[in-house]
Image: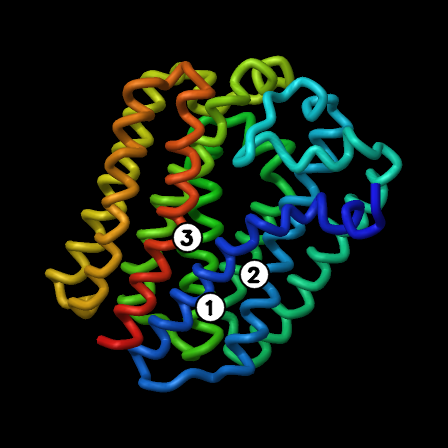
Amino acid sequence: MSAASRLLGPMRVPFLALSLVCVALGVATAWHADGRVAWPLAALSLVAALAAHVSVNAFNEYLDFRSGLDLRTQRTPFSGGSGALPADPSAAPLALAIAIVSLAIVATIGLWLVSVRGTVLAPLGVAGGVLIVAYTSWITRSPYACLVAPGLGFGPLMVVGTHIAVAGRYDTAAGIAALVPFLLVSALLLLNQFPDVEADREAGRRHLPIVWGRPRAAHVFVALYALAYLSLVAGVLAGALPWPCLLGLVTLTLAVPAARDVLRHPDDVKALLPAMGRNVMVNLATPAFVAVGLFVG
């Protein structure tokens, strides 16, 4: 394995785009609230978000490899890890180092932002740190915590945290907008657990597809999708978000067939692959479209 693969594999670089669009959404709510953006603080927020994402990814890669889960999981283009450590076990210490260094970057930037913007950011930073450290080893053993933790990290913590870092205060638009990635990212990780049920059960995990079964979890997936779009419409109707944010509804063209396929084929991993691909696109495009709506509205 090349040096680049050893370094970038545990980071799961292609998936970091999700942090980019969630930070962009937080920046957009700050722009909507004040008509301006403190771009240096926005850039720092992006670095912190990317470092947090890298850290949780690298911890997950390292711990799944150490537990042997990576050797049993049914890997897909969207789930099951990068496969970097099973391919090169000698890279495991590097993956752990990446996780720890990235977490240290998050903590350093977070402490500086708290010194600039005040202690209102501190609870968000502490919650984010707990999610990073606890996700693989503890949160995945609780079906309900595992369901909401990813959405909490990318929704309220990342979007609202970015907004406060950039604008210096909380705004209702940020809280409402954060509901979209909160619900969609929860759906993203929920569906990505479907191929891993057997391997995860052997490893002692207890996420929703294990505890409830894939068919019932499929209905939860659809409910999360529905709530995400309903929260967007409700935010616009309540006046918290400008009407151009309804541009986010464009992704229903992807969400509807994805939901249909998940309901039809919950136990057929191969048949789920197109839905998993659409699920990723929904998660990236919807917050991006909402952000555009905030900038132009």
Instruction: Report whether 285 appears left or right of 225.
Output: right
Name which residue type carries label 2: Ala
Residue 108 percent coordinates (x, y) = 69, 68
Q: CA distance from mark 3 to mark 2?
A: 15 Å
Q: Residue at x 49, y 53 (%)?
A: 18
- Name the residue carrying label 2: 49
Residue count near mark 3 (Cα–Cα under 10 Å), binned few <14, some 14–19, many ≥20: many
Q: Which one is earlier in the sequence, the residue at label 3 or at label 2? A: 2
Residue count near mark 2 (Cα–Cα under 10 Å), binned few <14, some 14–19, many ≥20: many
Of all residues shown, which one is farthest toward the left?
237
- Name the residue carrying label 3: 284
- Name the residue carrying label 1: 162
Residue 223 percent coordinates (x, y) = 26, 33
Provide the secondary structure element on which disc 3 rests: helix
Residue 165 percent coordinates (x, y) = 48, 74
Instruction: Determine contact: label 2, label 1, CB under 8 Å.
Output: yes
Q: Which one is earlier in the sequence, the residue at label 3 or at label 1? A: 1
Instruction: Depth check: give the residue in front, 54 or 128.
Output: 54
Instruction: Report whether 220 appears left or right of 140.
Output: left
Q: Quadrant of residue 95?
A: top right
Q: Which one is earlier in the sequence, the residue at label 2 or at label 1? A: 2
Instruction: Report whether 170 appears left or right of 228.
Output: right
Instruction: Depth check: give the residue in front, 73 or 144.
Output: 73
Provide the secondary structure element on which disc 2 rests: helix
Of the 4 image quadrants, the one containing the C terminus is: bottom left
Name which residue type carries label 1: Thr
